[in-house]
Amino acid sequence: MTASRSAQTTTGATSAIDHDGRGVVKPTPAEVMEDTGSGLDYGVRPDRMPGLLTPTDRFYIRSHAPTPRVDAATWTLRVEGSGVHEPVSYSYDDLWNRFPHVSVVRTIECAGNRRVLFGEEVGRPFAGTQWARGAIGTAEWTGVRLRDLLEPAGITPKAREVMPEGLDEIRARRPLPLDKAWADDTVVALAMNGEVLPPDHGFPARLVVSGWLGAASIKWLGRIEVSEEPLYVPWNTVDYVLIGPDFPAEGPARGPVITELPVASLVELPWPARLRAEPQVIRGRAFAGENRVARVEYRIDDGPWQDAAIESPTTPGVWVRWQFRWDPEPGEHALRVRATDDKRNTQPEFSTRNELGYLQTSVLAHPVRVEPAR
């Protein structure tokens, strides 16, 4: 796809957008989006995913503050910190015109996806954004490799962490190690699915960190700090960490920091689903973070596990589409799906419990009621 810059209009400097009293800009109709109740966070309905790429109008939104208004004409991206020899700044035009562009198809998923179902699994609700299954999406991201923006600043030999920072009200930020920042597919994106980034998805520029939790892909970039020392912020010490008896504190962090995501699967049906007693093709997605999805299996009620057909390329950092045929009998059924990645990690029977309800990855019993055929 070729990105177009002509559709984007901005006014003001860096302020919240008041769009009919909402914290987000784009429409979030209930027929395609799931409302978490926060006013900022909306998932995509799994039964409204038409292709490998998630349409921009229904790509999930996860924000810590209202979508800011950023004026591209005055916007700059600064690279600075103890890990560079000379700070540099880039304009919006610099990113469009001075650097080679790359396009990568990558999946982004919130670490709290399926938190509501995780709560049902353990018998108590978790605090945090009340995600069902829709905090995940895949897009083609076009922009500049992060390393191409870091190199002109001169990275010092002792540099170890890179921390992007957003221009939202709370300046969301989260460090990543230098080697992940330097990866071929860590991109400062300017466009999404062939069009300039929409406001809710990070205009004028956002980071895309392949295979990691969505919190690493900071939106509305304004600053990138390169540090020779470890960097600690709320997003890697008290949030987006695993907290509980099985997870000891690590320095100032309350538990291990979440980075790459585990393998999990998704059925493209409502929850619960209602079908007719006639031949069906059941479809879904599976995602394995930095790894490749190698196998997807399904099970109807207490029947045997069977292989589903994977219908898209298996690429690290990208979900796959799978499907199978089913001729259901009338009645109540439980549909289970499990995925396995190329490192032989398979979805477990139970998720690992933690205080914040992150990383729900266990096999779900998807309820399906089958009505008699007409």
Image (tube, grey):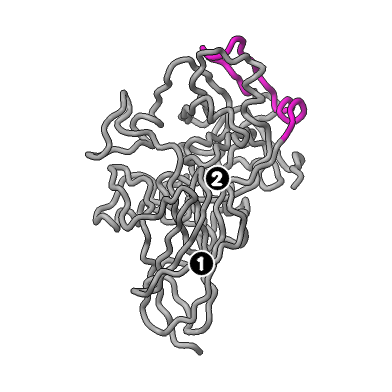
Which circle marks residue 338 in the picture? none
**Horizontal arrangement in the rendering, residue 366 relative to residue 284 (left or right):** left
Instruction: From the viewer's side, name the closer residue of 313 and 174.
Output: 313
In terms of sequence position, does the residue under pointer 2 or pointer 1 come before the other?
A: 1
How far from the left and from the top, in percent, is residue 368?
40, 73
Q: Secondary structure at mark 2?
A: loop
Task: Provide the residue designation for mark 1.
Answer: 308
- What residue is at 51 percent from the left and 64 percent from the top? 268
Callout 1: few (<14), some (14-19), or many (20+) C-alpha neighbours within 10 Å?
many
Say what amino acid the circle numbered 1 marks: Ala
Does residue 99 show up magenta in the picture?
Answer: yes
Where is residue 93, by image quadrant?
Answer: top right
Gap between marks 2 and 1 measured at Cα: 20 Å
Residue 308 in sight in this render:
yes
**Horizontal arrangement in the rendering, residue 90 relative to residue 370 (left or right):** right
- What residue is at 57 percent from the left and 37 percent from the top? 208
Does residue 241 show up magenta in the picture?
Answer: no
Residue 69 in sight in this render:
no
Compared to residue 317, the image places residue 310 above or below, namely below
As drawn, which residue projects farthest toward the bottom?
374
As drawn, which residue projects farthest toward the left?
245
As drawn, which residue projects farthest toward the top?
85
How far from the left and from the top, in percent, is residue 104?
65, 42
Q: Nearer the viewer, mark 2 or mark 1?
A: 1
Instruction: From the viewer's side, name the closer residue of 101 and 191.
Output: 101
Task: Provide the residue designation for mark 2.
Answer: 317
Instruction: From the viewer's side, name the closer residue of 199 and 327.
Output: 327
Q: Which residues are magenta?
A: 77-101
How far from the left and from the top, in percent, is residue 20?
55, 47
Say what amino acid the circle numbered 2 marks: Gly
How far from the left and from the top, in percent, is residue 309?
55, 66
- What residue is at 35 percent from the left and 55 percent from the top? 348
